[in-house]
Amino acid sequence: MNNRDTPRLIISRAAKLDINDIARWYDMRAAGRGEEFLADVDDAVAQVRRFPESGPLVYRSLRGLVLQEFPYTLFYVYEPGRIRVLGVIHWRRDPEVWQARAP
């Protein structure tokens, strides 16, 4: 896949807030842990960009990709030419939290 075949990535404001809040929370508990979380999110985003349908459909058109090192799921929608990341949400959260973000 070359760069022009790579879908455009859009990260919603809500997803950015999720990511920043979670990274801060981890950093308050252990120095550098927030950076590890951010690296895990980056790895998930890279996988989704390379294989947009790798996350299974979990609700309507919403897909979810479980992070490798942290108990969170990256929720996104894949549409031709673009990927919209709508949230990064803990596994134990009420499903209505991420379902409410589905288009």
Image (tube, helix red, strand yellow):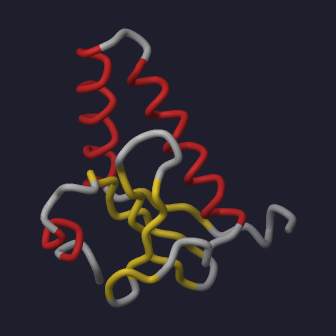
Residue 77 image-quadrant placement? bottom left
**Image location (x, y in percent) of residue 41:** 49, 44
- Pick the residue in front: 24 or 71: 71
**Looking at the image, which is closer to me, 61 or 82?**
61
Left or right of 67: which side holds 92? left
Query: Which residue is at 50% across, 78% downward?
Result: 56
* Image position, residue 70 (x, y; %): 41, 41
Q: Position of residue 80 (x, y in %)?
A: 61, 85
Is residue 69 shown left or right of residue 12? Answer: right
- The image shows a total of numbered marks equal to 0
The location of residue 61, given as percent across then percent down, is: 40, 87
Picture layout, residue 34 above or below residue 50: above
- Which of the pair 3/66 is nearer the observer? 66
The residue drawn where x is 37% and y is 80% is: 58
Q: Quadrant of residue 47?
A: bottom right
Task: Name, please, the residue furthest toward the top.
Answer: 31
Above or below, 72 relative to 103: above
Query: 39 left or right of 17?
Result: right
Which residue is pictured at 30% across the width and 24% down the height? 26
